[in-house]
Amino acid sequence: MVFKYLKKTLFRFILNKYICLKNLFILNMIRIYTLLFALLFAISCTNDSEMKYPDEKKEKESLTLYTHRHYDSDKLIFKKFEQKTGIKINVVKASADELIQKMETEGNQSPADLLLTVDAGRLVRAKNKNLLQSSNSDILNTTIPTHLKDSSNYWFGLTKRARVIVYNKTTVGSSDLSDYEDLVNNRWKDKILIRSSNNIYNQSLMASIIANKGEDSARKWAEGIVNNFARLPKGNDRDQVKAILANEGELAIINTYYLGKLINSKDSNEVAAGNAVGIFFPNQENRGTHINVSGIGVAKSSKNKDNAIKFIEFLISKDIQEIFAKANYEYPVNKDAKSSELLKSWGEFKEDKLSLTKLGELNKKAVILFDEVKWP
Amino acid sequence: MKILEIENLSKSFESKFEVVSDCTLNIQTGNICAIVGESGSGKTTLFRLIAGLERPDKGTIRINGTLMSSDKFIRDVKDRNVGLVFQDFSLFPHLTVKENIEFGLKNNKDEKVKKLLETIKMENFPNRYPNEISGGQQQRVSLARSLAMDPELLLLDEPFSSLDTQLKSKIRLELRDIINKIGISSVFITHDIIDALEIADEIIFMDNGKIIRQCLIEDVFKEIKDAKIQNNMVELKRNAELILSALKKN
Amino acid sequence: MFLKIKHFKRDFNKWTLLIVALSLFLAIPVFSILISLFRGTGEMWEHITSYILFDYMKNSAFLIFGTGLLTFTIGTSSAWIVSKYTFRYKKIIEWLLFMPLAIPSYIVAYSYVGLMGNGGTFVEVLRDFGLSINRIEMMNIYGLIWVLSFSLYPYVYAGTRTIFQSYPSQLKHTASLLGVSEKKYFFSVALPLASPAIIGGLFLVFMEVLNDYGAAKYYGVSTFTTGIFRTWTALEDLQSSIYLSAILVILVFILVLIVKWLRGRRSYNLTQTNTNQKNANNTVKISGLKKILYLGILLIPILYGFILPLIQLVIWGLQTFDSMFNYDLIVLGLESLILGLSTALFVVFLACLLIYLSKWNYFKQFNVFSKIATLGYVIPGAIIGVGIVRTSKSLTDLFSFQFNFEIGHLVYNSILVLIYAYVFRFIAVAYNSIEGNTLKLGKNLSESSYLLGFGEIKTFFKIDFPLLKNALISSFILVLIDVMKELPLTLILKPYNLSTLALRAYEYAEDERVAEAALPALFLIFLIGTMITLLNFKLRENKQ
């Protein structure tokens, strides 16, 4: 091994000498480039030595988490983990797509140990791109319901959110509502508020409809929704609820936790908007309401797999799940954990048991259908 | 002795035609030589080639017998020991008169600057900035700045173009005095033949990048056959343009 | 060309080598993107061209047209009034006119919804005055044009003001002697003469518009840039998104060519006229109705571009002050400032190096490379990020295959890579402004210095540097502002232990917690505002 390396270097050295003697131009070029590289190398070694060799120091174990979540409560949880185990969590925050792209190009040398996203589709994509590895843990297998994790344990759901219908309490009664499919009804012409199809939650909802009803009915459904738009899609989920308050439409499709955040907002207008609407979980008579998860997987490049699994187990422990659920108005995946009072007040609901893997697989199809029906 | 020898010098820029085309000329040491030609005839480019600010496509330049540039070799501007006074004088605006003159000097600064300031009659304003002195004064400072380096050859780019006619003849004589006093070989560019006739020892005529004639001042009119012209030198001077076109026809 | 090659040995110098090496080093992302173009379009290309491409183009074109028109009107009118008239508090107004630059446009977009939306601050005020409106609709393409124009017009205002102020008074006198009315003087003399500056400013505006992602996404307007992201993320087709950016770059080039063609051979140079004359008494005092009118014109952009968004941000900031204001925020601010300062230093240094190396190099055809190195401004940030990540990948692969040496931990998550990306993205900002100033300086001065026996580097430090100092400081501050506001590159390339104020604000806004985003945004505005104040001060000093 060493011999081979020496031979290689020697050969290179002789070759360089030969070229140098032959041509002044190349000599200069090599000199300058070496200088440049040496300089860059020196700077990066001196300036950033402590952050670049976190594992060489061995003083403190650490995990690098690539995450799409940026809630303050998460920071608290990471700190708790560090207190408990002494393992520090280094956080790289960006959108899931960028993180996946980053992991893909970084390949084996990626510093990532874990990937945390806010929807299952992206985790499926990461798995398909061979960026995750399977992790076996009894705790994880028994705690997390099967439809909320990957079948071969490449990723695990941490918290649930449902994509529900909210309605103007004064003009609509909950008896007027039934299924997602019913929203294409003429009764809702110019009444439906929903955000752009760029949004991953809409893409996942569409994917679930494709999975349950087939491509053609899904396209017809999207067409029907576009026909019933109260206005062109714009803004975020919160803005849709505010638009109900302003009588721009009567129904909005949003994620549950946004309603929780509106009601608990410091902005009086947001509180008013949150209180003006009622929440309705659709498809209770049949497949159940569409849900999605915030989930996590161990990166293939991880050199600290055991610690990474320990971290995931920590995240789904009862106490932490309760923090998750309370701070962000999400539903915990751990049955033992209690959800917040507000979520309890919304009542139990039947959830769509469709494997979340499907959402990832059909995501692209969903976007194509959105484009075809001109859902902006 | 020749101070400047140029052989087959050519230069073209991005466009195809040659701005300086196959020029050959020699200038005697100690002479003042004028290069006369219309604007666009390649005078300034020739100058920049001599100073080393442009690189020739072909041909050789020697100053005082030393090779300055050829196809294979080029001497760097800063090692040429050539002085050049730009048309706009190019004084450094952030430096005073004194600082401008001593800019290139490494030792003996004060003594030399004092002498030069005397020569150009500016000893009273060493601490003024270029924008605080007149155009004529700026020109003299620029000249002094070049002379401070003791160049072997002094080049002056259109030294009289920005002056009005009344001032012109005064400045011409002043310039001639300064140059003669220092005894430096110099070349200047002008589009006005009167300038040349007044102070030059030699005249070179350029047109379209080519040298059409080089001669001593006394021989300028020798080869012109027209008797009328030969008989009336005074009128000749007044009709400088006529002469130039007559020369071109030859 | 061939003649030059003949003299290769003679004319080749270290500068030639350096310029080629440096430009190639800086242009790596361009080559990386070019190489990926050879891989062909992605599988979704047909879908894109048949369903969405036309809409992207239409929207982007309309957006450019709208913002162009509005920024032109606002920028030139305010520049004219400021440079021709004196009135009380003029200095403050001049400074305030720059301030919209301090607020990232996506933050302006969010705060406008807070102002004009249902129960918004501005709407409530109007209701108190008895108007019966619920909201002013901002979230459409017209709203986007409004928001972008009022946050980007300073690019037009800045350059135009400088030109207007440099007009010698003879120009005006000549016009009056010819019996030209003030209106006609403005439209047929002053404005055409300022066109290089106006076009330059508009070009910057267009680049910002084409690069905007946050505002357009929030307002639900599908533009080219949102399309690039959609193709990349939702359609999972990076290849096609690179093609989309290539189309964008080509469109930008067409724009540049049109600009060049419009300028034509006409000279707009005023340097021929005697600039020694003092222009100080060029301004006129105004009073009466005219004063009210003109002050009104100046207050409109200040109000809509700066004060209104600021009020909304302050309201939000106060709401969330308890939970958001902490030690972390201060650290974050310092971090972004230090990152910005060091990047700006690099950018200005390298821009100078590029400009001067191409001056010192005798093979002018190699200078094309330096132009390639300044292409970063027209390529969307996210695509640059991808290009750089790809390049780092090939670099680490090379090292691990050839030398058995893993440098992954040096390249990924390294602040150097981030700074490199910033340099590539923003070098054009510094390059253009410094180059303009070196051209104004002319080459005679440095040539005089060569003739007096100084080499290139000494000449630079003795002559060019002191004379360019102000221009260097201005471009330094401009780059600093840009870096501190930058989003997509920071998102993709930042090391994990580093964050910036812009990023923090974006995270909260993206998370639909706009109120929480206000405090980091306000801190960012404060820092950038300080920089702008410095710049304004510097520009004024320059004038004197």
Image (spheres, coloured by chain):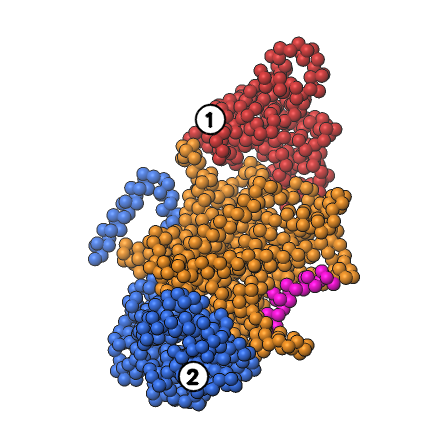
Local secondary structure at mark 2:
loop
Neighbor class of circle 2 (other Cα within 10 Å; few <14, some 14-19, many 20+) is: some
Q: Amino acid at mark 2?
A: Leu
Which residue corresponds to mark 2? A177
Q: Quadrant of residue A141?
A: bottom left
- Mark number, residue B59: 1
Residue at left 63%, top 59%? C74
Tint of chain A: blue
Residue at left 58%, top 29%? B40
Expressed as whole percent of the image width and height from the top left, the position of residue C532 reads: 60, 61
Local secondary structure at mark 1:
strand
Task: Indicate the quadrant containing the N terminus of chain C: top left, top right, bottom left or bottom right.
Answer: top left
Expressed as whole percent of the image width and height from the top left, the position of residue B2 reads: 53, 21
Q: Amino acid at mark 1?
A: Gly
Q: Is residue C252 above or below residue C135?
A: above
Expressed as whole percent of the image width and height from the top left, the position of residue C268 reads: 62, 44
Report the chain shown in red: B
Q: Is residue C65 above or below residue B99?
A: below
Residue C370 drawn in magenta: no
Provide the major secondary structure of the magenta segment. Answer: helix
- CA separation, marks 1 and 2? 93 Å
Residue at left 68%, top 61%? C297
